[in-house]
Amino acid sequence: MDVYATLSHPLALGVFVLTLFLPVLVGFLAVRRTRSQSDFFVGGRAMNRIVVALSAVSSGRSSWLVLGLSGVAYIRGASAAWAFVGYTAVELIQCLALGPRLRTETERFGSITLLDYLESRFGDGNPRLRVIGSAIIGIFITAYVAAQLNAGAKTLSSALGMNFVLCLVLSALLILVYMVLGGYVAVAWNDVVRAVLMLLALIVLPAYGLVRVGGLAPLREQLVGLDPTLVDPLALGLGAFIGFVGIGLGSPGQPHILVRYMSIDEPRHLRTAALIGTVWNVLLGLGAVLIGLLGRVLVPRVEALPGSDPEMIYLALSSDLFGPVLYGLLVGGVFAAILSTADSQLLVVASTFARDVYEKTLRRDAKADEAARLRLGRVVLIASGGLALVLAWSAQDLVFWLVLFAWGGLGASLGPALILSLFWRGATRDGIAAGMVTGTVVTIGWRIWLRAPTGLYELVPGFVLAAMAIWVVSRAQRSQRS
């Protein structure tokens, strides 16, 4: 089965190419709103609630939702739904409770990045938190961006029949052009477009698939005939259940999601954003799971999928069920999902190294005007994109190994630090530093040695132990002072 065969049709190719170059147009429109470093990295704290909600959803899901979750549902069945239940619940709470406080505190301190805030909250002139946080973000997110570029290049290469390296460069250029022009504003508005594309893809495809099999009742009957556990939402072990639900623990540590809260025009508008984002998350998650279940019925043998890869079920069904125009749009939706995370994370890397490393650590005593700071942000963005491009080309195994636990590493190292810094006045700088280091070390160690025998996702123990480290070190430090 050649899932990309119908892209040879001119209409399919035209629709697909349109989805590739639409973001560049948005970048040209956004350049007028980008006049300062604050505009470039947090949209001048003037983004409306709809843009914040949809860009947070889009940047947080990427190809993991469109391809990954549907593939998990194809193998595991209905129990895969717990994977989106966890992050949907946490991001609802996070947007309502953590978001407004983070927006208020970052404006009070004049913080543009997450590390900016932590340094302002605990700093005494020592850039320790910036250095530790920059290392964590640099390792995890640069590798994650490289993996997304790699996935995007493979999609382009297969869809257009082009050389992989050429597609890799094209993927990077498509992102960098509009990001250099419009920064965060361009990224956020492009994510809104991509969120709509993802929703369209994950509603139209399962809806048509249900018509094809005769509805939900016949779908359930056929799944039971294949394997009764496919319709049982609790057909998974305790470790897998905790791991699926525990995915949500990573959300408070994702800088590319948190910056959305920092960018909103008014903290109170996050209540509306939380409602919109939750509805979107639920619809996208249900759509991905339904695609996996429908795929199991329509293509019951995984060997019939390209490369025997269950994550190809979305593209396989799209090719089988639709004509060229809609298929071109659905394939464009996959590419949009990939870029929606890559551009947001690349902007985080650029802001970290431009603001936290260069401006606030290496050149702390130097003064620069706003034009120079904006120029620095653009230069670092191009350099970061170049580094990610080189990693995607030369170190594919390392990149994909890192991306498996990048979400967990960021969540465990930065999540407890942010939560306790906002809600516990007893937290100290050394405690926060200890938590960041503990979360990183536990995540990596658990992934290497303990994930296979325990079946437990490394984010869960990493998050818990990082929070404990912050509490123990902070308490001990305050006891010594008293």
Image: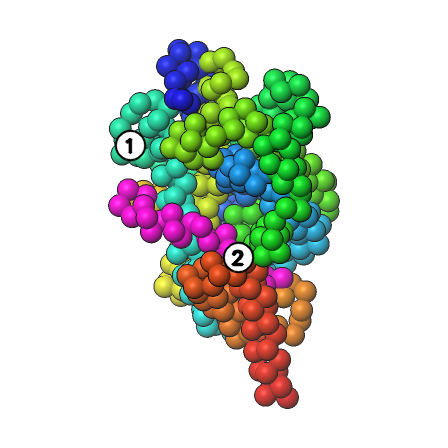
Q: Is residue 170 left or right of residue 54?
A: left
Does residue 226 appear in the picture of this structure? yes
Q: Closer to the camera, 235 or 322? A: 235
Q: Earlier in the sequence, mark 1 or mark 2?
A: 1
Report x, y in % for residue 455: 53, 57
Which mark, residue 455?
A: 2
Residue at image mark 1: 164
Q: Residues within 10 Å of mark 2 (few under 14, many from 20)?
A: some
Q: Hey, what amino acid is under mark 1?
A: Phe
Residue 278 vertical position relative to residue 134 in the rendered view, above or below? above
Which mark, residue 339?
A: none
Report x, y in % for residue 147: 39, 43
Q: Residues within 10 Å of mark 1 (few under 14, many from 20)?
A: some
Q: Quadrant of residue 168?
A: top left
Which residue range is magenta in the image? 392-419
| Residue at figure coordinates x 51%, y 72% from the top left | 434
